[in-house]
Every structure is written in C-alpha cells, then in structure tokens.
C-alpha cells in the first residue's frame, strides 16, 4: 500500500451533527491518498461512532479530556506521515483541496500552508451579513488566511515547535513560527466556514479569539504578527465612497471595540482560558 500524501488530524468535541458531512467532503476525490485521524476529545455523544462509520479507513483516537490542544497532540502522536494538516471539525474542505495543500508543502524548506477562506452566511442575520461585508473588505490581501479552519506543515516546518502549547489560538501560534515568505495559500485550496449566525454569537466568538491572541502575546508565543490585509487608508476610502457599506462599517467598529473589552474581561476572570464553540452553526 502506498504512503498517504497527507495526514489529516481532525480534533472533534461533541460534533456528531457535523462530523459525518465534514468527513464526506474531506474524502471526496482523495480517500486513498489521505490518512485521516479524528481525535474525539471529551465527547458525550456519538462523535467517535459517527466518524468510524463515515469510512473504514478513518482512524479514531479518543481522549478523555475535552481539549483541542490535547486532541492536536494526540493526533500528532498517532501519525508519522508528513505533510500534516490540522482541520477543524466544523469546516468544509474537499480532499482535492487538501491534496493541493500537500503539493504546496512538498519541499525540504520549512513551510506552513493554509486554505483560502470562503464564508457561508446562509441563515445569518442581516446584521451579521452587513458586518462580514465590511470584514471581507478589510481582509483583502491577507496572505495568512487565519480563521479558515485548515492549516498544514511539512516535516521541516513541524520541527519549528514541539508539542502544541496549551493556548486557544493554535493556528496563530503555528503561523507565528514562520516568516511571511514561508506562509503559503495554495491555489485550489479553499475551505468553507460558517460564521456565527447572530451578533451575540459573533461577539462571543470574537472575544474568544481576541483573548486567545492576547494570551499568546502575554506568553511570548505570538511570533511575527499576521498582516492586517489592505492598508487602513485604502480600506477607509473604499468604505467612504460606498454608502451601502456605512451601516456595516459602524457595526464593524463597534464589534471591534466590544470584543476587545470582552476579551480583557475574560482574561481577568478566567484562570484557564478554554475554547468554546459557536452553537448557532450546529443547528
């Protein structure tokens, strides 16, 4: 049997409602070329059984602790295959896209690669859609694609760090180990992400992300910060000339300020910063 082109590690906590469809998408066009390891962590539902039933070639590792970091480390210990991709259980990415990621990582030089981000806003409120119209404008030109739920490293890149540290922003931590010229977004590699469906859920998720980034910086693990995207001047000019963006821009500014306020409060009141998921996208 030939060696897989890529190992795919999927941390999953109580994801029985989404893991089946996610794995079906992932195996599309690449079932024989991927080693897929689902790490069911702290599950109280049928996540593990659903993953095993999705395809006979899928390996399921179960760990008792509900922790994405524990799951990532357990997945690493379960494989020797490189390149290696880490994929969130609630995103949609095809096997063909992951093979494109594997091809980009086929080099002896240290590299990290991420998927291009596509948003699925079906079912989102009007306020959330207005917010993301402006968010996408601000994100134009970003070369890191943080938030796509998919990133991978080759063998030389994985040597940049040991076990995953106990942090929330694992993707930001990993990409911080690489210079901008070492970060890749391969053509043909896209993941579909469903953002929170309500402003309340959006604030909760944004505060969690902001707190995770602050946690990294406080621990000295932030590395080189990702580029902000388009320049602030170009972004503001694009908003000013299009009145249709003004309501979304006001909302974008308020969310930006409010999430950082909530993030500081979270860090001050939670001794251990945990990762909580968005339930509005699981229905």
Image (spheres, rainbow, N blue to C red):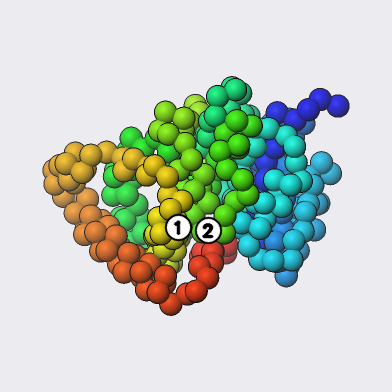
Furthest toward the front, the residue is 220
Residue drawn at (86%, 27%) of the image:
1
Report if residue 159 is visible in the image.
Answer: yes
How packed is label 2: few (under 14 Cα within 10 Å), some, or many (20 or more)?
many
Give residue 227's quadrant in the image.
top left
Helix, strand or loop for disc 2: loop
Identify the residue under disc 1: 219
Residue at (28% x, 49% y) in the render: 134
Residue 122 pos. (x, y %): 46, 54
Q: Nearer the viewer, residue 74 or 35?
A: 74
In the image, 103: left or right of 190? Answer: right
Vertical placement of residue 216 versus 9, above or below = below
Secondary structure beneath dot 1 equals: loop
In this rendering, the answer to whether 61 lies above or below 207 is: above
In the image, 92 versus 216, the foreground residue is: 216
Q: What distance separates the C-alpha of mark 1 from that of mark 2? A: 9 Å
Of residue 46 and residue 276, the one placed in the foreground of this image is 276
Q: Position of residue 133 (x, y in %)?
A: 31, 49
Which quadrant is home to the C terminus? bottom right
Image-quadrant location for residue 196: bottom left
Q: In the image, residue 31 lies at what x, y percent?
A: 74, 34
- Mark 1: give few (<14), some (14-19) or many (20+) Cα within 10 Å: few
**Along the line of sight, which residue is nearer the eye, 43 or 124?**
43
Q: Which residue is mark 2?
A: 167
**Residue 245 placed where, x, y %?**
22, 50
Residue at image point 32% right, 64% down: 260
The reply to whether discs 1 and 2 touch (Cβ–Cβ < 8 Å) is yes
Numbered disc in front, either 1 or 2: 1
Ranked by sequence position, the earlier of labels 1 and 2 is: 2
Q: Residue drawn 78% across and 52% down?
A: 60
């Amino acid at each position: 049997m030939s060696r897989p082109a890529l190992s795919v590690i999927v941390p999953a906590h109580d994801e029985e409602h989404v893991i089946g469809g996610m794995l079906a998408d992932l195996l599309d066009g690449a079932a024989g070329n991927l080693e897929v390891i689902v790490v069911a962590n702290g599950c109280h539902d049928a996540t593990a059984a659903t993953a095993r039933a999705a395809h006979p070639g899928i390996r399921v590792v179960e760990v008792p602790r509900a922790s994405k970091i524990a799951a990532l480390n357990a997945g690493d210990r379960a494989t020797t295959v490189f390149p290696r991709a880490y994929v969130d259980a609630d995103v949609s990415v095809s096997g063909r896209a992951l093979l494109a990621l594997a091809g980009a990582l086929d080099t002896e030089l240290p590299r990290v690669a991420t998927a291009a981000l596509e948003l699925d806003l079906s079912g989102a409120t009007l306020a959330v859609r207005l917010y993301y119209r402006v968010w996408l404008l601000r994100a134009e030109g970003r070369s890191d694609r943080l938030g796509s739920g998919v990133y991978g490293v080759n063998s030389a890149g994985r040597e940049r760090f040991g076990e995953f540290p106990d942090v929330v922003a694992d993707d930001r931590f990993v990409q911080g180990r690489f210079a901008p010229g070492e970060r890749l977004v391969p053509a043909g590699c896209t993941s579909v992400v469903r953002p929170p469906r309500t402003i309340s859920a959006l604030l909760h998720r944004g505060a969690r992300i902001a707190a995770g980034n602050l946690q990294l910086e406080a621990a000295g693990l932030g590395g080189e910060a990702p580029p902000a995207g388009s320049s602030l001047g170009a972004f503001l000019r694009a908003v000013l000339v299009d009145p249709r963006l003004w309501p979304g821009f006001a909302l974008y500014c308020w969310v930006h300020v409010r999430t950082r306020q909530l993030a500081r409060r979270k860090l001050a009141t939670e001794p251990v910063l945990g990762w909580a998921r968005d339930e509005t996208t699981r229905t």
